[in-house]
Image: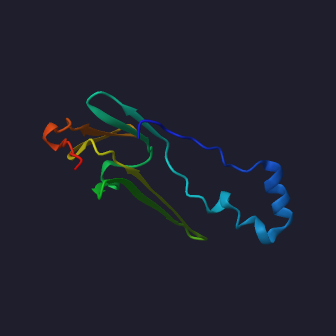
């Protein structure tokens, strides 16, 4: 969890145009099926892990953050609808944006002591580390 791995899997313009000519494959390319995820920075400090999720356009109430079986899951969903009715026409537009990101938590975290804050499009999550329990360390004797 202390490193962030980025991959650049966006297809080139040339490969997209080649696939456009072969329209049977164009809309099934992974580029179009890929869910766009917000960027996440992860910082490993002495006392905690800090996650910064770039998620502009959301409100605090749009987020759901939970832990289960050592997995931290961050999700958000928002929708907007605009209706305009005039004498000669009606225009309806709507947008829906959502994402889900999950992170495997290391063994040294306190799942009961996670704090989150959302301000100016940046979701910050602080996951406190636990101190290693010396009583949990055992020596095994060989017979």
Figure quadrant of the N terminus: top left
Left/right of residue 70 with respect to residue 93 in the rendered view: left
Q: Residue furthest top?
A: 46
* Residue in front for this viewpoint, 24 or 135: 135
> What is the count of numbered marks?
0
Residue at 27% over, 41% down = 108
Q: Is residue 44 above or below residue 98?
A: above
Where is residue 57? Give x, y as percent.
44, 47
In the image, is residue 11 above or below residue 96?
above
The answer to which of 114 and 137 lies nearer the viewer is 137
**Residue 130 to residue 98: above or below:** above
Quarter-of-image position of residue 79: bottom left
- Coordinates of residue 44 in the picture (x, y in percent): 36, 32
Q: Residue at coordinates 16% horizontally, 37% vertically from top-left?
A: 134
- What residue do we see at 76% from left, 65% from top? 26
**Residue at (34, 35) in percent of width and height:** 50
Expressed as whole percent of the image width and height from the top left, the position of residue 49 reads: 33, 36
65, 5: nearer the viewer:
5
**Left-right relation of 127 to 16:** left
Q: Residue furthest left?
A: 135
From the viewer's perspective, tell me whether residue 120 is left or right of residue 23. Answer: left
> In which image quadrant can residue 119 be found?
top left
Structure colour scheme? rainbow
- Furthest toward the front, the residue is 143
Q: What x and y, as percent, mark residue 41?
A: 44, 36
Q: Between 130 and 50, which is closer to the camera in this rendering? A: 130
């Amino acid at each position: 969890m202390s490193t962030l791995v980025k991959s650049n899997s966006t297809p080139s313009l040339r490969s997209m145009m080649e696939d456009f000519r072969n329209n049977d494959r164009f809309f099934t390319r992974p580029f179009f099926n890929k869910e766009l995820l917000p960027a996440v920075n992860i910082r490993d400090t002495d006392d905690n892990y800090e996650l910064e999720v770039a998620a502009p356009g959301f409100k605090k109430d749009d987020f759901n953050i939970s832990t289960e079986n050592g997995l931290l899951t961050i999700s958000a969903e928002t929708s907007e609808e605009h209706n305009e009715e005039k004498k000669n026409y009606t225009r309806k537009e709507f947008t829906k944006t959502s994402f889900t990101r999950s992170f495997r938590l290391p063994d040294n975290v306190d799942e009961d002591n996670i704090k989150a804050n959302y301000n100016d499009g940046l979701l910050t999550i602080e996951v406190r580390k636990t101190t290693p329990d010396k009583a949990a360390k055992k020596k095994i004797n060989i017979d």
